[in-house]
Amino acid sequence: MHTHSARCGAIATAALGALLATLAACGTPPAGPAPAQGGRGTPGRAAPASPPASAPTAGPTRIPGVGDRLYRRIPAASRQVVAVYGEGEDSADSRVVLYTRQGAQWRAVGGWPAHNGRHGWTTDHHEGDQRTPVGVFTLTQAGGVLADPGTRLPYDQDADAYAPPREWGEARRHDFDHVVAIDYNRLRGTPPRDASRPWGAGRGGGIWLHVDHGSGTSACVSVSGKAMEFLLRTLDPARRPVVVMGDRATLTA
């Protein structure tokens, strides 16, 4: 141990020697510095290390970009939400994001470019307006021209019933290879091709998630074939999936 300078005085030296002797007799090392104020450590115990960068982080407790008005319409039992974020009220461009709920947290598990009605969005959809209805709707049935790719949803394959009209041309030949019915003005528990309209024919219907052809739709929401297969393999009736959709301004209201 280094000696203090003469300026410390003999009294200080003696006091320090006495303290060290006491500590040595007790077998207790000198206490380390106190933890910083506001730190997570417990005095005398190191603070836990931060999680590695690769560790998953908690998701949001709300679906991003969805305001109170529509968020309150998501059933409490729902654990899967397909959010469709329209670029604008009159735009056919949108983005689809699939969220799953784990505890109180929502996590995005996939996102894809998408299209909606070629004339945009509406809160008062009618047959032929070529606008996609804004709202929260359940997703309960699937089907299409091609065989079931492995979905848990009830799947109705019928190459004739789902084949697009020939006059739509080659570019739209694969639109309905796979579809998921959006439960707008339809009878739940029936295949997507069922034409029943509980609210009347004038309110439109046949609103589906289906395969994209590169531009706006009649009123449906479309994503790539790969995205449709992912959605079909991931959507689970036990998780009560719903779609929340609209232009961004209306979604956040």
Image (cartoon, rainbow, N blue to C red):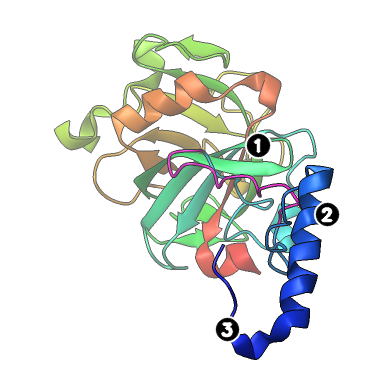
Residue visible at 57% across and 17% down in the picture: 153
Q: Say the numbered circle drawn on residue 22.
A: 2
Going by the image, does 1 lie left or right of 159? Answer: right
Q: Residue pushed farthest bottom?
A: 7
Badge nearest the viewer, 2 or 1: 2
Residue annotated with mark 1: 101
CA–CA distance in space, label 1 to label 3: 67 Å
Percent position of residue 215, x then y: 27, 50
> For numbered disc 3, what is the local secondary structure?
loop
As shown in the figure, which amino acid type bears the numbered disc 1? Answer: Arg
CA–CA distance in space, label 2 to label 3: 23 Å
Quarter holding residue 170: top left
| Residue 219 in view in this figure | no
As shown in the figure, which amino acid type bears the numbered disc 3? Answer: Ser
Say which of 60 and 115 sits in front. Answer: 60
Say which of 205 and 176 sits in front. Answer: 176
| Residue 244 in view in this figure | yes
Residue 53 located within the stretch drawn in magenta: yes
As shown in the figure, which amino acid type bears the numbered disc 2? Answer: Thr
Q: Residues within 10 Å of mark 2 (few under 14, many from 20)?
A: few
Residue visible at 72% across and 56% down in the picture: 30
Q: Say the numbered circle drawn on residue 11.
A: none
Q: Say the numbered circle drawn on residue 5.
A: 3
Would you say the residues marked 2 and 3 are in contact, meaning their CB atoms lie under 8 Å apart?
no
Q: Which of marks 3 and 2 precedes in the sequence?
A: 3
Residue 196, placed above or below residue 48: above
Residue 17 located within the stretch drawn in magenta: no
Residue 146, placed above or below residue 172: above
Q: Residue pushed farthest left?
A: 170
Q: Which residues are magenta?
A: 40-55
